[in-house]
Amino acid sequence: MLRCSMPQRISNGMCLALLVWAQCSNALAEDTSKETKVAKDDKSIPTKVDEVGQPVRLEVFPSSVKLTSARQAAQIIVTGHYADSSVRDLTLLAKFASSNSKVLDLRGTTALPTGDGTAEIEIEVGGLRAKLPVQVTDFGKVERVTFENGALVALSKQGCNSGACHGSPSGKGGFRLSLRAFDPKLDELTLIREDFGRRTNALDPDRSLLLQKPLMKVAHGGGLQLSKNNPAYTVLRDWIAEGGQADPVGQARCVKLEVHPSQPRVLNRPAKSQQFAVIAHFSDGKQRDVTQLAAYSTSDEEIASISNDGLVIGHDRGEIAVLVRYLEHIESVNLTFVKDVEGFEWKEPPANNYVDELVYSKLRQLRYQPSETCTDSEFIRRIYLDVIGILPTLDETLVFLANKSSTKRAELVEHLLNRPEYSKFWALKWGDLLRLTSSQVGVEGVHKYHRWIERAIQQNMPYDQFARALLTSSGSTLENPPASFYRTSADMNDRVETVSQIFLGARLQCAKCHNHPFERWTQDNYYGMGAFFNRVQKKKTLRPDEQFVYTTTAGEVTQPRTGQQMKPWLPGVGSVNDLTEQDRRHAFADWLTNPKNPFFARIEANRLWSQLFSRGIVDPIDDFRDSNPPSNKDLLDRLAEDFVKHGFDRKHILRVILTSRTYQASYQTNKFNTDDTKCFSHQEPRLLGAEQLLDAICHVTDVAEQFAALPASMKATQLPAPDLVKNDFLKVFGQPERQTVCACERASESNLGMAIQFFNGPLIYNKLRHEKNRFRQLMALDQPNHEIIRQLYLAAVCRLPSDKELLASLQHIDSKEDRAAALEDVCWSLLNTNEFLFQH
Amino acid sequence: MRQAMWILVVALVMCQARWVNAVETTSFRKDVAPILLDNCVACHGAKKAEGNFRIDTFAKLKTAGDSESPPVVEKKSDESEILRRICATDIDERMPPEGDPLTADQISVIKRWIDEGAVFDGSAADAQLAAIVPPPVHPDPPVTYPSTVPITAVAFSPDGKELVVGGYHELSIWNVESGNLIRRIKNIGQRVHSLMFHIDGKTLAVGCGTPGKLGEVRLVEFASGNVQKVIGTTTDVVFDAVYSPDGKRLAAGSADAMIRVFDVNSGELQRTIASHSDWIISLAWNADGSKLAAASRDKTCKVFDTSNGELLVTYSGHNQPVKGIAFHPEGNEIFSAGGDNKLHRWKIADGAKSADVATGGEVMRLFRGDGFLFSVAADKIVRQFDAANQKAVRTMEGHADWVVSGTYHVASKRLATGAFNGEIRIWNVGDGSLVKAFTAAPGITQAVAAK
């Protein structure tokens, strides 16, 4: 990866710079775009008898089938249990037979009624047999297709109302549906009445525009989206044939979705398929198999895909979440696909702590071998950058490298966690999240708010207290700096979105206008949460830069679509009816920081983890949802549990992670882990953050950067706010404006602007030309070239130059008349190496 | 599946057969174009143009797409790409790609036409196929309706005793006093969106069509029910077809965003006005026929000079689709209404709004008569305004569903309105009283529909 080890000859420095940068960007691109190649035959569905193996027990879902109309059907699922306690889905391999074809027929693995009565389905697979009792009633009675549970579900299934199609805010081609049918009233209007009812034709249902368009019988901008064989076609057609009307008042709604299998499964090759069955439970107590109408997706199509009728086929090893959607109901089930890798033999490295144990357990399951531990040079550079944001001094590096103690790494972890720079650097991260800018909270305000955060981190304030202090803050923003939280999140919407993104790991913005398209967050939830925060008010005071935050005792939130007044609502709890507290925020903070809260500890543990690796266990870190499962659930659970157990001690979690072998793994991959991008078998190099990079350049050149009127000793990684001082270099390298609470605002992609900065940007140029920079100081001390080169290497990459590197540099200097200019070249090329630019 | 295979085999045999003894020459417009329209244009039209190949006009049909193979080679069906593709056995090659292949008969028609020289017998090579195919003979309406259809067009007979109602592939004629069905006129487009008698009282202009497929104006002799002429055939429904006050011209507005003006005597197209960017929903002539006003789903209204088709003014004050339009009695201002639930009055000279009145619901149609202006709306209410000053005269309430059509009869001073649920209401404009209410769906009695 770090191929361009430098310096090479730099006679034509400019061209070289571009070349070097190109290589760096390539390396970065390679890191992020590793594609898993899927063998073609891997997409086949299991049909072979040898894939059955020898099950010891069959489990059949459902345990009995009750069909109460000719329009119902039941998906059958047959699971084989094996002696080694593994399971396989044998649905596709089993033989089914109906004992009475006048009651029941089978189409594939689905039971269809043919008349009233009782029957049995005989199931046989792997030498085992099972019987499934079936009862059919009311076969002759017409069961009306409902608008919501039928027509809208069918449109959702076909994706008609997805965000890219007619579900977009302005629709497509003059036809607008609500996004995934979140607003049935609007859809009723659009489908039934709008444009003189032209979309449906009850007198000749098959000629309805609603069907002719997706069938491409009439030109359709979205192309072919429906076939007459789709269950959705039948449903839509029947709904239209029955008059195409809205549902009567009191129509039963779906209240719960039951998915089988409901628990995570591990499928070992040859097992690689899983049929799902989905049962909708309705408010009138009835239930119905909706397998054919539910919509399916998987979190990673490369690992496994799912068909329209709920059959998952694994393509590669790894973990996925299967997402099942029916109206606003979403359920997810995790599946792990395991596949043998040729020549793979697990060698368990010693584990330093539970992090390693849990990471290794996952790696072993998925057949990845962890990388070796990194070198001391790599370690000291990595951990300095991660914990305190800056590079070690030459002395610190030399002392550490020379230290022979077996506990020196753990000691360094402890030392760094207690350095003052630790709290300054982590205050930068929280400054991003809490949007500390002077434009939002004033110059005095931003300094005070920043100092408050820094002090909280320095004192290792337990995270629950930290969150509570922010959420329940009141009073003067200058006397009580966390009250600035309500200056940066100025209104109810902003507060709901900020709180959910920072503390609940959920991006809720979309639920402001409609139900979340991928998650169970609804518009009601959004405004329900808003009811905790809408009473917070601010007023100006006589002091400039100051505002006074307080709460009123009245004021409710109205859901804009329904016009309903919303009760305060909590995820997993529901509407909160009797709040005794005057200030509702306290009730929210009580719920949030409760050790049993399923979000709070996990989100922070994951965020801490993500600061030390190239990704979070859940990634992006503020996008926790069923469709974005953790890459190692046990690990995240354990970290969260440990975090709670230690009283929300963030340093404790950092210590556990930093002392693990997992953290200390080399960035170099081995034969059995190059494909791994999610399971932490090795470290992935990361481009230094803007502030880290600037500090690192200052450190290597030994020329400090002065930030306007801020104290001379202040480093870039310690700036309270990006708008206190304008620095082009920082902007180019992705310093966020702090306009959003999204961690994604900090850009981590490389771009041309960065290349230009390193190519001929003024910042680097001026530092290389500086009269008192590191190599000119050494020249003044009459230090020989090899010593100067040695020191530059130690400063930049925490190691000594190799013989080859040293020789190349010396030759370059010798070839030049101007020694200082030649050393500029050497230093400049060192700054352009991946090894310097990346943390690894 | 087996049947599909069989058809394919027959098709193959047909493809190779020689049709030397064809008696009649195959017509492009009568025989070939209807097949292409039904099976090919959806994917090979202006909207999709799969493979960069279009079939929606004869000129396009002759132009090769991405394959660069000539689609039609005169007299050489075996070198014609379209024939190769409709006969292909490879499912990835065959057209149409999904569903059933063309029937053996359809394939043989196309082959014969090519082998006879691929002669074009339409009016213009760049005209839409839909416009050159002979007018279809529409299927008969259902004897009894399984459910009501929205009443999107109504017209009084000249004597005011009968009401003509747009039905499903038909016009149904009802006795205004009794609400009984008198007779039915067949061979009409699937949906009827406008009905208007010529000043001679004999001919009825019917704006109709099939959503997404066909639009046309049928000129029907009222007494006999015979279709005299079909004009303005296009690719989507005609929403409004209105005679000029002198009865010499007819303007039709359609979902293809075009306004077409015809000479009534000859049936010839005088002018096509392509100024709106979305459906034309309503049209209105001024008293001397010098101006034509249009309301469109593109959220604007426009007024045109009918002598040269030039745009006089665009009114964009609605910000919502506009559905109804009418001239002020003095002729220098326009009333328009639609999705913004407001009646607007504005000046033709500069497009400046002079007044607006809330209408309570989305206005579906606007029409004038006897110094009054009427609106029918989605709030189920019929409103009567003074056309001089848009002051509310009265509202007529009682419809149980959206009111989507209406017409006024001068001599009897009666108003007929039609609702989405199939109900007709006849009102006395003098006092707003209800004369009669009935459900205009043959076979469905009022009692059933009223539940």
Image: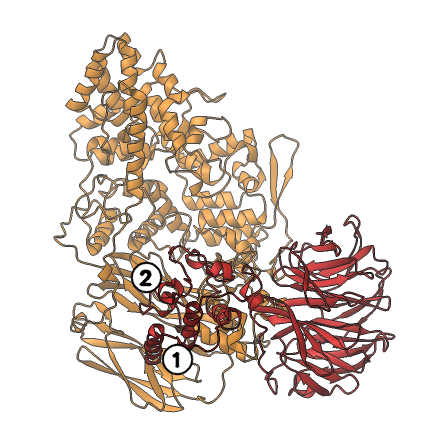
Examine the rendering and report whether any part of residue B294 can be seen: yes
> Chain B: what color?
red
Q: Secondary structure at mark 1?
A: loop
Q: Residue at x 63, y 52 (%)?
A: A553
Q: Amino acid at mark 2?
A: Ser
Q: Looking at the rendering, in which quadrant would you find the C terminus of chain A?
A: top left
As drawn, A239 above or below A436: below
Taking depth in this image into account, of B307 and B245 the one nearest to the observer is: B307
Is A308 left or right of A413, judged from the image as shown?
Answer: right
Q: Residue at x 21, y 24 (%)?
A: A399
Taking depth in this image into account, of A416 and B8 the one nearest to the observer is: B8
* Residue A222 x, y percent position in the rendering: 47, 60
Q: Amino acid at mark 1?
A: Ala
Taking depth in this image into account, of B104 and A631 the one nearest to the observer is: B104
- Tag 2: Cα neighbours inside 10 Å, few (<14), some, or many (≥20)? many
> Chain A: what color?
orange
Q: Secondary structure at mark 2?
A: strand
* Residue A762 x, y percent position in the rendering: 41, 20
Taking depth in this image into account, of A196 and A143 the one nearest to the observer is: A196
Precedes in sequence: disc 2 or disc 1: 1
Judging by the rendered image, the residue that carries numbered circle 1 is A73
Q: CA distance from mark 2 to mark 1?
A: 24 Å
Q: Quadrant of residue A666?
A: top left
Is B162 left or right of A332, judged from the image as shown?
Answer: right
As drawn, A116 above or below B315: below
Examine the rendering and report whether any part of residue B451 can be seen: no
* Residue A67 x, y percent position in the rendering: 40, 84
Judging by the rendered image, the residue that carries numbered circle 2 is A305
Q: Looking at the rendering, in which quadrant would you find the N terminus of chain A?
A: top left
Q: Chain of mark 2?
A: A
Q: Chain of mark 1?
A: A
Colour scheme employed for the rendering of this structure? by chain
